[in-house]
Image (spheres, coloured by chain):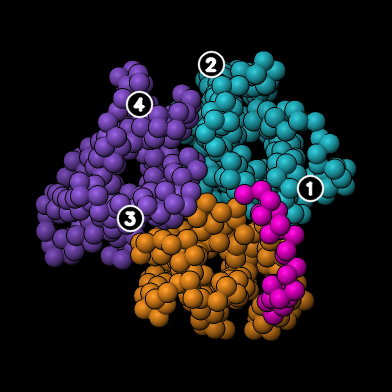
Chain colours: A purple, B orange, C cyan
Amino acid sequence: MNQWIYFLDLCGTSVFAIAGVLAAGKYRMDPFGVIVLAFVTAIGGGSMRDALIGATPVFWIRDPNYIIVILATVIMCLILVRKPHRIPTYALPIADALGLAVFTVIGAEKALSLGLSSMVAVVMGSITAVGGGVIRDLLCRQIPMVLRIEIYATASIVGGICYTLSIIVGMDSMTSVLFAMFSTLIIRLSAIRWHLSLPAFDLKTKRI
Amino acid sequence: MNQWIYFLDLCGTSVFAIAGVLAAGKYRMDPFGVIVLAFVTAIGGGSMRDALIGATPVFWIRDPNYIIVILATVIMCLILVRKPHRIPTYALPIADALGLAVFTVIGAEKALSLGLSSMVAVVMGSITAVGGGVIRDLLCRQIPMVLRIEIYATASIVGGICYTLSIIVGMDSMTSVLFAMFSTLIIRLSAIRWHLSLPAFDLKTKRI
Amino acid sequence: MNQWIYFLDLCGTSVFAIAGVLAAGKYRMDPFGVIVLAFVTAIGGGSMRDALIGATPVFWIRDPNYIIVILATVIMCLILVRKPHRIPTYALPIADALGLAVFTVIGAEKALSLGLSSMVAVVMGSITAVGGGVIRDLLCRQIPMVLRIEIYATASIVGGICYTLSIIVGMDSMTSVLFAMFSTLIIRLSAIRWHLSLPAFDLKTKRI
């Protein structure tokens, strides 16, 4: 089980690093900006979580695999993607949705495994999932996606509640993880597909 | 005594959460943005303080009452305040001044209780008091109020110095707390009343 | 040796505080804004590093000399520099380059002394060196210099790699420190002298 969550965590890290690279491409950053945004998006949320709960040194310092996965992802992206503007516009939100689902579960699981309360577990799931994106958006001088798009963080909160409840009622780990990830993905992808977040983008058009 | 400071802390948390909700209303955020800004304003400064001094897990993780107070405050605000633009414009700075006074004392008291130096206690009082507002303003893409309005953080620093000195000269806790809060409030409210911060707003008008 | 690195650290702190004061002057901040930017620039990166590796209370809480050095630097600057707009425009980047070199070595050295891996040491060198400037730029609502100017953080990364490799091959501490600082300074100052960062400034002109 732990092996399996660990593998998911590395996948989520890679997916969020891609989201960071895509953001860097969108804002025409230089190669170093790409690496910074990939790192920040991928490990920013988890670092915030670990610093808040006192699980220091934070996860990616204790386990070099995270740094390696991010660097490998960035290099792969820079080789495969020569023309950032040709990436379809829906690629960034979908990569983001996948990372959102995985990191929500990882964050909630870590809080519960440390004996913290269910409420804190839900908060930690959200911080892990949206924290990196918030820092990335701040660095790009954007109002964080999480404040613009209601269904974004809501999906993470619902996923965290699903995971915590599943564990409380005694569901086994793998089912809980899949159930929570599925809930998060369905909500977030529905929001993307049917433009449930359009009003928030309207705010952006008018005011920034 | 501790009970009393704890009660003040919860009041300050609620007041700062209201300041966060008012800011969210001002920038027309969606419901989730309201919750995020309430949380960030209320516990951002204290979380920074605890992360810096190593008092982890940070206070609101160990004590679920803070999360409950913030959620209750947000729900109450969303019920009572249907039309955010009808809130009088002075409500936000006054709520902020009250939180500023309480959190300055809480932060300085926590540093002193951990045996840290007086100078660090003053800094921690300020971080606790202004940290949440700084993060809130960053998330709203505003230049932080603390950098625009001189008398804002200055009030917190004076309050921290008053508290630390009172403790050093052997004043009892409650008197020290009241004396420090009173100093902070007088300075900050005078600055609001007589527009002592006008030049800083001028800077804003010209440059942003 | 440790005495010597400690002295360098205090010098770097002072130099970065000056960089913060110059930034505050550039954006016409009030006296308190000057102090905040000096503090944030000088100890922001190291605080992030210590919070991430769990070396809490962070360095400037345990050692009051850092606060004293920053306050003394700010007072000195405010006395000597009455007219911020008369500071030559190259003063800020050169002060920044010196701080960059010192803090890179300090960060990498701290990580290695705690037994962390070489890869983490390079990352910690960069976080220590560029973290404070990133927070300062965020507070000034600028896209962080580190994302605009490729050669900036690259210089820190190269310096961190030089230091880590020097230690691994068994070079003595002082030689390693000087070698790493020299590499960082040469790269950064060359970038400033021959405007190797011009394209990044172009991005800024076009888009912000």
Instruction: Residue C2: tell me if it is visible.
Output: yes
Q: What residue lies at 19% left-to-right and 60% top-to-bottom?
A: A162
What chain is tagged by disc 1?
C
The circle drawn on residue A199 is 3
Name the residue that disc number 2 marks. Answer: C169
Question: Is residue B199 one of those drawn in magenta?
Answer: yes
Residue with the mark numbered 1: C74
Residue A124, position in %: x, y? 34, 56
Q: Chain of mark 4?
A: A
Depth check: give the residue in front, C10 or C24.
Answer: C24
Disc 1 + disc 2, Cβ < 8 Å? no
Q: Which residues are magenta?
A: B182-208
CA–CA distance in space, label 1 to label 3:
46 Å
x and y, in percent, of residue B176 in the image: 69, 80
> Secondary structure of the magenta portion, mostly?
helix
Q: Which residue is the site of mark 4?
A: A85
